[in-house]
Image (tube, rainbow, N blue to C red):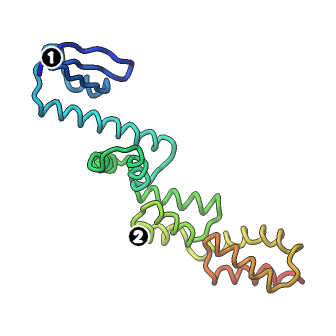
């Protein structure tokens, strides 16, 4: 097929008309990279290649859009791209390219996510671990990050801070020590702290105050 005309559709896209009445719309980036010009003859294989390159370009731009807003795990980007209806094999090709060029890095994502939730939300290890798994982070990465960024002393300090706030809210409304302790433990469990840490924190808070 032979290119009969090349028309600028808008600032981002180019329309190519062929002598057999086929029409190909390419992003300006893909078009200029292709080197196509009027009266060029292209094969069916090259036509298909250009269609694929154009799809890959748009998938990558969509992925960059997500990454410009915040860090994402590879799995998060994959899910979002699937929801847009892109083909699975093309998504995989783009994700491999982004990972190779360090636009996607699950270990760094997990480290940043853990540090943020530890610092701003005061989440315990169990909650952070659960959320990382939901985001598709592999178990070996989760294990590495947990051991590096969360130890028992840090967890205990964070649990004590967040429990003290809850304790001050609950104490005027709860009539006995046992109920107060149960509510605090349940609250801390929900924040990702295990029973051992939750129990120690509750003993420190409640036993230090006459009920």
Q: Secondary structure under badge 1?
A: loop
Vertical side of 96 occupied by 29: above or below: above
> Could you tell me which quadrant the C terminus lies in?
bottom right
Residue at image x 40%, y 70%? 139
Marks 1 and 2, Cα distance to the nearest angstrom? 55 Å
Which image quarter: residue 184? bottom right
Side of 49 where 93 appears, left or right = right
Labels 1 & 2 near each other (Cβ < 8 A): no
At label 1, counting other C-alpha atoms closer than 10 Å, the crowd grade (few under 14, some 14-19, many 20 or more) is few
Camera-near label (1 vs 2) is 1
156 vs 191, nearest the viewer:
191
In the rendering, at what x and y percent does residue 183 appear?
75, 77
Q: Which residue is drawn at 18% across and 20% down?
A: 36
Quick check: 13 above or below 135? Answer: above
- Return the x and y of residue 21 as percentages of the image width and height: 19, 19
Picture residue at 37% right of the left edge, 44% below the top? 85
Q: Nearer the viewer, residue 117 or 45?
A: 45
Residue 101 appears anywhere in the view:
no
Q: Which of 143 and 17 is in front in this view?
A: 17
User: Visible in this render: residue 176?
Assistant: yes
Q: Return the residue at label 1.
A: 19
Q: Quadrant of the N terminus?
A: top left
Q: Name the residue under label 2.
A: 139
Q: Is residue 206 left or right of residue 111?
A: right
Residue 88 place in picture, x, y as percent: 30, 50
Mark nearer the N terminus (1 vs 2):
1
Query: On the rendered structure, is 12 left or right of 172?
Result: left
């Amino acid at each position: 097929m032979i290119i009969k005309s090349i028309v600028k559709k808008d600032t981002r896209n180019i329309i190519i008309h062929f002598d057999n009445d086929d029409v190909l719309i390419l992003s300006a980036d893909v078009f200029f990279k292709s080197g196509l010009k009027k009266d060029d003859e292209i094969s069916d294989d090259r036509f298909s290649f250009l269609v694929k390159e154009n799809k890959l370009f748009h998938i990558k731009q969509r992925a960059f859009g997500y990454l410009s807003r915040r860090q994402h795990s590879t799995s998060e980007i994959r899910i979002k791209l699937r929801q847009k209806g892109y083909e699975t094999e093309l998504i995989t090709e783009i994700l491999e390219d982004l990972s190779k060029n360090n636009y996607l890095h699950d270990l760094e994502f997990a480290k940043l996510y853990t540090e943020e939730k530890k610092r701003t939300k005061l989440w315990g290890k169990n909650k952070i671990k659960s959320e990382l798994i939901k985001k598709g982070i592999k178990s070996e990465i989760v294990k590495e990050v947990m051991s590096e960024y969360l130890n028992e002393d840090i967890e205990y300090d964070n649990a004590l801070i967040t429990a003290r706030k809850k304790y001050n809210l609950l104490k005027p409304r709860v009539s006995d020590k046992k109920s107060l302790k149960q509510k605090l433990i349940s609250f801390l469990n929900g924040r990702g702290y295990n029973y051992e840490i939750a129990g120690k924190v509750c003993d420190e808070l409640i036993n230090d105050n006459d009920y």
